[in-house]
Image (cartoon, rainbow, N blue to C red):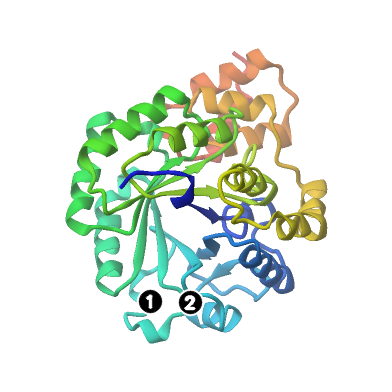
């Protein structure tokens, strides 16, 4: 499959990844208006939140079962609706096997490397239930070339809808994009779509996306983005930015509806809890540390660059990708 700008698709994850900013408490009216505007803007996929065990009000983009999902998104475009299941946070036994019992049929399975075996079993089940499944392994930067190769080979037996390069910490640079694509291209079936989810902690989300667009000739490409870049750390790729870029080739996306979301909802959230480039987030990406370590430092200390680097260097390797508050608290208390 030869790729070009016409067969690149956008998956907007404002309601899911953006929810880390406001604890997913958008309000029901806001959730529905964001969905409606993204639909009118012609976003190809709209990720509406997380499947997560527990009871949540209709004001949140968190869903403990499919009853709430089916009620809120009744009569919406099933082809565009997407939800994320994070391994360890939602009991897969609660997932409806029958298509008629669920309005969402496109599921993104997110998991950490230590949960790979469990994740693959869940992915197989969902595929057998007739779902379109995205495979989203978090923190792709901690995978060796061999591990990426072996993972893609295993997925060939399952044939998921899409496999995602997930730059959780915003640490990837051009050479990483080239290397990962080369491994995937040499091992993964071309029938599986390639997806890219980036964070902007190094300010490289857009540049890395353009690099992937340039080299991805064999797969249908799906790009994750969020309105105004709403997301953890320094945020994500801006939906309005990538839509404008792709519109240079094909006037598909109606940006007026994206700007309406920004003016009516996102600006207010940003003024209260901004996502932006800071030294803390920039350095967390350089040292491959979870961005919540940077968030902790921003909220509790005023440190110079040398002190920040010193702390990041002392975080144990096995704790860097998974935020552990006890670790950062102890390091900040030490005087040496």
Q: Which numbered disc covers residue 69?
A: none
Q: Residue at x 57, y 58 (%)?
A: 16
Q: Quick check: 67 above or below 138?
A: below
Q: Is residue 148 visible?
A: no
Q: Residue at x 67, y 72 (%)?
A: 32
Q: Residue at x 56, y 35 (%)?
A: 205
Mark 1 = which residue?
Answer: 94
Q: Residue 128 appears in which quarter of the rendering?
A: bottom left
**Residue 58: x and y, percent?**
65, 76
Q: Quick check: 22 above or below 184?
A: below
Q: Residues within 10 Å of mark 1 (few under 14, many from 20)?
A: few
| Cα separation between marks 1 and 2 | 7 Å
Mark 2 = which residue?
Answer: 65
Sequence order check: which comes first, mark 1 or mark 2? 2
Q: Residue at x 59, y 23 (%)?
A: 283
User: Is the C-beta separation of discs 1 and 2 under 8 Å?
Assistant: yes
**Is 172 displayed left or right of 92 in the figure?**
right
Q: Nearer the viewer, residue 225 or 94?
A: 225
């Amino acid at each position: 499959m030869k790729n070009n700008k016409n067969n690149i698709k956008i998956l907007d994850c404002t309601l899911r990844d953006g929810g880390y900013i406001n604890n997913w408490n958008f309000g029901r009216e806001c959730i529905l208006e964001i969905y409606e505007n993204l639909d009118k803007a012609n976003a190809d996929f709209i990720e509406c939140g997380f499947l997560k065990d527990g009871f949540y009000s209709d004001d949140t983009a968190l869903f403990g079962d499919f009853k709430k999902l089916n009620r809120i998104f009744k009569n919406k475009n099933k082809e565009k609706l997407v939800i994320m299941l994070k391994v360890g946070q939602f009991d897969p036994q609660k997932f409806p096997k029958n298509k008629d019992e669920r309005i969402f049929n496109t599921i993104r399975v997110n998991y950490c490397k230590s949960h790979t075996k469990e994740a693959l079993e869940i992915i197989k089940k969902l595929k057998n239930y007739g779902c379109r499944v995205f495979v989203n392994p978090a923190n792709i930067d901690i995978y060796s070339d061999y591990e990426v190769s072996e993972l893609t080979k295993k997925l060939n037996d399952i044939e998921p809808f899409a496999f995602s390069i997930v730059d959780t910490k915003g640490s990837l640079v051009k050479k990483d994009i080239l290397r990962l694509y080369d491994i995937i291209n040499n091992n993964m079936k071309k029938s599986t779509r390639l997806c890219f989810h980036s964070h902007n902690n190094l300010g490289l989300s857009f540049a890395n996306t353009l690099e992937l667009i340039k080299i991805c000739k064999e797969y249908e490409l799906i790009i994750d983005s969020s309105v105004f870049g709403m997301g953890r750390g320094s945020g994500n790729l801006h939906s309005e930015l990538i839509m404008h870029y792709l519109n240079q080739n094909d006037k598909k996306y109606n940006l007026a509806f994206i700007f309406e979301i920004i003016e009516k909802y996102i600006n207010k959230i940003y003024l209260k809890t901004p996502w932006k480039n800071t030294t803390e987030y920039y350095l967390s990406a350089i040292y491959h540390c979870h961005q919540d370590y940077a968030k902790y430092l921003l909220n509790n200390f005023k440190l110079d660059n040398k002190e920040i680097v010193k702390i990041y260097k002392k975080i144990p390797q096995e704790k860097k990708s998974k935020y552990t508050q006890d670790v950062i608290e102890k390091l900040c208390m030490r005087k040496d």
